[in-house]
Amino acid sequence: MNGAHDMGGMEGFGLIGAEDESLEPVFHAAWEGRVYGINRALGALGRWNIDKGRYARERQRPVDYLNHSYYENWLAGIETLLLEALLVTQEELDTGIPAGLVSEGIERLVLTEEAGSQLPSRLNKVLLPDQASPQFAPGDRVLAKNRHPSTHTREPRYLRGHVGVVHEHYGTQLFPDMTSQGVEQGGHLYCVRFEAGELWGAAAAARSAVYADLWEDYLEAVA
Amino acid sequence: MADQHENHRHEHSHGHDDDFTAPPTVIELRVKALESLLVEKGLVNRDAIDAVIDTYETKVGPRNGAAVVARAWTDPAFRVWLLEDSTAAIASMGYISAQGEQMRVLENTDATHNLVVCTLCSCYPWPVLGLPPVWYKSAPYRSRAVADPRGVLHEFGTGVPETTEVRVWDSTSEMRYLVLPQRPEGTEGWSGEQLEELVSRNSMIGVEVARKPDLTGKAR
């Protein structure tokens, strides 16, 4: 979807204003850590995946997304996910009082202290076996399709309609446009190089290029 | 946006652990209420949340990445492996977990300077760098890194010669990118441990170069 999250090439946000890295804390307030921890703990329940999580944050009104700090956006996403997974009701969120029981058997999925102290991995979920031969190979010229799905996609707006060259084939990987809709499907993934001049016009700095990872459905062959 | 972030941070830090006298903010109350609701419903365990926070505050961070870089600077065979099969080489040092399952290491040279961004959200290689800094997740960086990388580098005080190609890597998939900065001159014979001190987090994102030996305050 063409949401406020898709920021590549936007202007007017001002300076980056980075903090000194030796002084910057991991969390800037205790509540940020709680939001991070709640997100991880809820993830263990297996009711959604990372792409659904991203889609939940992106669907906020653009004004809200831009006004929110990073972990405020996470909180908004968590509330959306909880409601859509029927784990909480709007009334429960409004009152803070539990009203209904959750689905049977969920207690055995709840993240434990021991599991929370381990670094998680979902290695086996990312790469899938090939279901078809890849359509493109390194060196091929490809066009990033001009597509505007109303749901989640990982094809940024600033690349659409532009021609690049395949740099590397990353194999078959979960396709976010479908996994965000709850359908587990794979697609060939490619790292594609776009010249800065192709993306930003003749005024773009010379000797500069953008590499982005794009699924086969985002691309078409260029002669 | 930078200003708004500052305001948010300021506003929301009231009532936080270092200031018990101020009333909690709206966001703090909202998070507290949500956590209590989820605990009462049996969906989350408070001790588990504490453990997650502790893990990401203390067990992962850019020192992991610095160890990878220092090893690549001192061990030519490891450097080759790291560039050819980044995921396996990094995993061999024990750094593999969520947001780092698939890695590509990008080597900076005189000819090429690499810079990593996630324009769509905040994708970042957690096992080697920890959680991303605020600026990496901010609108100014996400919007400008792809369109004006040299301007972004300039803001970080990083001069890249016109003859050097700047490559910006937009993390749009589950592949995670780590920059291998150039080893600073004047570090011949340094140990891996000494070299790690020169490897800043920002140099592994690519917005800066590695620290110069005379800036670390360390005797050679």
Image (cartoon, coloured by chain):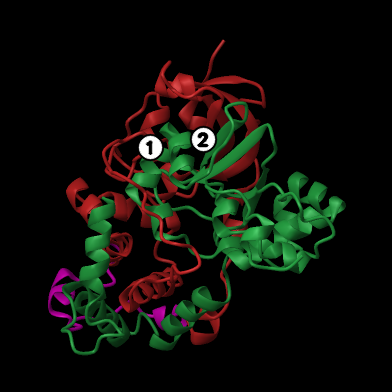
Q: Name the residue under label 1.
A: A8
Q: The red chain is which one?
A: A
Q: Is residue A74 visible?
A: yes
User: Taking B13 as reference, is A173 above or below it?
Assistant: above
B160, A59: nearer the viewer: B160
Q: Do labels 2 and 1 share a chain?
A: yes
A140, A7: nearer the viewer: A7
Instruction: Say which residue appears at 69% left-offset and 46% top-offset.
Output: B182
Apparent colour of chain B = green
Residue A187 relative to residue A106: left or right: right
Instruction: Say which residue appears at 80% left-offset and 65% top-offset.
Output: B191
What residue type is disc 2 on?
Leu
Residue A197 relative to residue A135: left or right: left
Instruction: Say which residue appears at 86% left-offset and 51% top-offset.
Output: B77
Gap between marks 2 and 1, in whole Å?
A: 15 Å
User: Taking A63 as reference, is A89 above or below it?
Assistant: below
What residue type is disc 1 on?
Gly
Q: Mark 2 points at which residue?
A: A214
